[in-house]
């Protein structure tokens, strides 16, 4: 039987890890994900997990050890944030190209500088081209549920790619919520055993991982990663459907909130979706045709589902919790507009950069944004991209 | 192997675990070091070899070929030790869970770039954590894979492509980092320094000790590079011998904190006997540069005396 309990996002992710009981965890403390390795250590101290916990001297070594462990045939996990993830960037690409289904609990935090410990998405957005599957969680429940689904997605033979399960630093990682925790036996059964086809410690067949690969082979390897990332769509759908069938909690590539008949919409990821939904409810009460789309899976990018979900909108605010400094908006803005191109060209869009470095985002902010979208729908000329909630 | 009845022939007749077909240069010390270390493995034992990005890596495992009989892992330049510690953790976990029955040994190779410099933190961490592995540095005293750039292992006044000797430069201004000593300061069970001498008994014995010592072990093997040091391929052994006879590269080991000097030259040769064999030091023999050779000799003498005192001789 599942139970209700009060858990923070970090505790929820750590609980999922305890229930999965991976073979190896290599992690290095960094705010706000530090609690996760702390929980691992306490689980080990109480004999609650059989995991080998490699207390590395840096995140670079954490990801290196995860690659070694995963290549060796083990189920390997890590947790990190911000600069820690940035220190891993080189190895994130290696993990993906080696086709190692490592699971990362990513607790999103701004990148320096200036140094800042609070939430935004600049860390994982910097890793968006690394070949990792990226799933974003709105709250502690989703962080927990997505962790439970992570291994089955990553380890599927058609996929074999690393996966990061993101949640917002502090806002989700440290806020305590009432969530549903599944039984240990349920998790064990749902996640299953990991038995890789090829691995370093196979006594019957030695294996070379990470060879030098020159131009006559490199591109074929990248083409296979492309294939695997696309295969992940169907696998995510299948695993999510199975999860829904067994828990009643629904997950897709994205979530549509009151999009029926919506004319004005916002599109965003993670914790601000909760605030946005509150604003949508209030506006709907007032007769404003507001709706919200929350992207759950950012890699692989659900371009088709996004275009479909946004069809019928007259004005859209695409909300980026990181600025890619292209000079014309954030990464979500660029990719969502590309997804709409040729499909829903009549939707007017603004790309908002918001909530950087933990800048608070309130219901009132969404009311302002929806007011701007209404003005744009009614013919007002607005810039393609603007910062919201900033002193200028 | 019993080292009181050691025979090179017997040692060299063991099946090769790094096989022919790799693309390392003739006269390179890298594969010589690797083959010597791998001979330490009992035939029934399996191994996973991790290699830092290096000449060795790009020349021995070029897709779709490999020269390695054992499982092989390369991830990047600066993290071979951390990667290996992940493999070792996987082994421990899977063995505990009954998924693996065989005995595996973990051997990591890095050049001096991947060991003394960019991979130093990763190495220090893996050793401090007590990873049951041997880390072998094949030290050729510069970044050879990218074209002979100086490293912290490059000896003073060597001419490299980033410490060029010229009318206004004597070559590399700094003296060599003493990595073996730093590794001994980690208080790990076994640290040793070796090279290719005579019948290879020194390196073969140290490799076996390192591989079969429980816990972390570090081997530093001087492995000359014909292109970077500028010598004829056939001179490899002569150069290694000169390094030992001049005390540029003393043979010693530190077992559970006990320092032992394995070889003391009957007559310590002047450092010029070593320097003159290599093009990278050619400029030191030009008139007016006598002081540079003196400075090198002073440094070697000082380090040799320090080592002897650590070994209580």
Image (cartoon, helix red, strand yellow):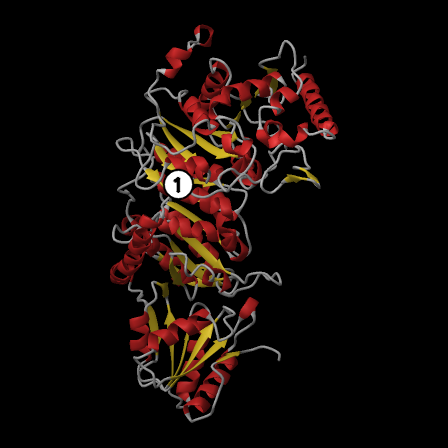
At a point 38% along the width and 16% down the height, the residue shown is B12
Relative image position of residue B259 (x, y in whole percent): 61, 18
Quarter of the figure with the C terminus of chain A: bottom right
Please determine whether, in this image, residue A147 is positioned above or below residue A58: below
| Residue on which the image places disc 1 | A69
As helix, strand or loop, the secondary structure at mark 1 comes to helix
* Image location (x, y in percent) of residue B111: 50, 34
| The N terminus of chain A, quarter of image | bottom left
- From this view, report whether residue B42 is shown above or below residue A134: above
Relative to the observer, which residue lies in front, A110 or A8? A110
Please report, as a chain letter, where disc 1 is located: A
Picture layout, residue A194 above or below residue A159: above
The total number of labels drawn is: 1
Q: Spot the residue most to the top.
A: B5
Q: Residue A45: tell me if it is visible.
A: no
Q: Is residue A328 above or below residue B12?
A: below
Visible in this render: residue A133? Answer: yes
Q: In the picture, residue A129 is in which quadrant?
A: bottom left
* Residue at x 43% of width, y 39% of height: B86
| In this picture, residue B110 sits left or right of residue B284 | left
In the image, what residue occupies the spot 30% across and 67% down? A252
* Left or right: residue A119 compared with residue A249: right
Give x and y (percent) for residue A53: 46, 41
x and y, in percent, of residue A33 in the image: 51, 54
Residue A256 horizontal side relative to residue A166, left or right: left
Q: Residues within 10 Å of mark 1 (few under 14, many from 20)?
A: many
Q: Considering depth in this image, is B119 or A139 the residue closer to the camera? A: B119
């Amino acid at each position: 039987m599942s139970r209700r309990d009060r858990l923070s996002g970090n505790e929820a992710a750590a609980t999922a890890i305890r229930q999965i009981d991976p073979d190896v965890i290599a992690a290095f403390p960094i705010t706000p994900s530090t609690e996760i390795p702390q929980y691992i250590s306490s689980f080990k101290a109480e004999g609650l997990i059989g995991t080998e916990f490699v207390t590395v001297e840096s995140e670079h070594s954490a990801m290196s050890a995860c690659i070694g462990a995963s290549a060796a045939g083990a189920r390997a996990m890590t947790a990190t944030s911000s600069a820690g993830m940035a220190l891993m960037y080189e190895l994130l690409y290696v993990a993906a190209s080696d086709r190692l289904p490592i699971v990362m609990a990513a607790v999103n935090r701004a990148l320096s500088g200036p140094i800042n410990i609070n939430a935004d998405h600049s860390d994982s957005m910097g890793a968006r081209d690394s070949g990792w599957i990226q799933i974003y969680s709105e709250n502690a429940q989703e962080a927990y549920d997505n962790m439970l689904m992570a291994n089955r997605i990553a380890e599927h033979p058609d996929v074999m790619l690393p996966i990061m399960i993101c949640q917002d630093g502090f806002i989700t990682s440290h806020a305590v919520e009432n969530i549903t925790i599944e039984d240990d036996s349920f998790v064990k059964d749902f996640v299953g055993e990991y038995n890789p086809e090829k691995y370093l410690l196979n006594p019957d067949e030695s294996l070379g991982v990470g060879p030098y690969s020159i131009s006559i082979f490199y591109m074929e390897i990248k083409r296979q990663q492309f294939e695997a990332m696309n295969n992940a769509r169907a696998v995510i759908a299948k695993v999510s459907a199975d999860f829904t069938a067994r828990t009643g909690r629904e997950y897709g590539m994205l979530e549509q909130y009151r999009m029926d008949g919506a004319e004005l919409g916002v599109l965003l990821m993670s914790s601000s979706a909760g605030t946005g939904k509150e604003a949508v409810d209030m506006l709907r009460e007032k007769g404003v045709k507001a709706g919200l789309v929350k992207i759950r899976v950012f890699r692989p990018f659900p371009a088709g589902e996004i275009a479909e979900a946004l069809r019928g909108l007259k004005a859209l605010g695409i909300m980026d919790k990181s600025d890619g400094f292209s000079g014309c908006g954030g990464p979500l803005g660029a990719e969502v507009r590309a997804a709409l191109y040729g499909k829903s060209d009549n939707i007017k869009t603004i790309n908002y950069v918001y909530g950087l470095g933990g800048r608070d985002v309130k219901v009132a902010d969404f009311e302002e944004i929806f007011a701007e979208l209404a003005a744009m729908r009614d013919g007002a000329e607005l810039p393609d991209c603007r910062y919201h909630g900033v002193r200028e | 192997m019993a080292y009181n009845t050691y025979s090179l022939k017997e040692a060299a007749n063991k099946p090769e675990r790094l096989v022919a077909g790799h693309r390392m240069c003739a006269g390179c010390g890298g594969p010589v070091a690797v083959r010597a270390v791998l001979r330490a493995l009992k035939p029934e034992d399996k191994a996973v070899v991790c290699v830092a990005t290096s000449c060795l890596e790009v020349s021995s495992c070029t897709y779709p070929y490999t020269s390695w009989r054992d499982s092989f892992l390369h991830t990047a330049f600066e993290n071979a030790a951390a990667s290996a510690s992940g493999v070792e953790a996987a082994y421990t976990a899977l063995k505990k869970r009954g998924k693996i029955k065989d005995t595996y040994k973990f051997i990591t190779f890095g050049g001096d770039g991947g060991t003394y410099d960019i991979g130093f933190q990763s190495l220090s961490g893996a050793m401090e954590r007590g990873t049951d592995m041997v880390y072998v540095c094949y030290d050729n005293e510069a970044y050879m894979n990218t074209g002979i750039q100086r490293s912290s292992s490059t000896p003073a006044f060597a001419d490299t492509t980033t410490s060029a000797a010229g009318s206004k430069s004597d070559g590399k201004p700094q003296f060599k980092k003493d990595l073996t000593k730093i590794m001994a300061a980690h208080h790990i069970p076994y640290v040793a320094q070796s090279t290719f001498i005579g019948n290879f008994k020194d390196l073969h014995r140290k490799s076996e000790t390192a591989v079969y010592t429980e816990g972390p072990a570090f081997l530093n093997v001087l492995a000359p590079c014909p292109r970077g040091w500028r010598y004829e391929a056939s001179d490899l052994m002569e150069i290694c011998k000169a390094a030992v006879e001049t005390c540029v590269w003393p043979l010693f080991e530190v077992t559970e904190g006990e320092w032992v000097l394995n070889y003391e030259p009957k007559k310590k040769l002047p450092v010029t006997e070593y320097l003159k064999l290599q093009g990278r030091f050619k400029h030191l023999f030009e008139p007016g540069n006598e002081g540079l050779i003196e400075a090198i000799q002073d440094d070697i003498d000082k380090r040799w005396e320090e080592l002897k005192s650590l070994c209580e001789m």
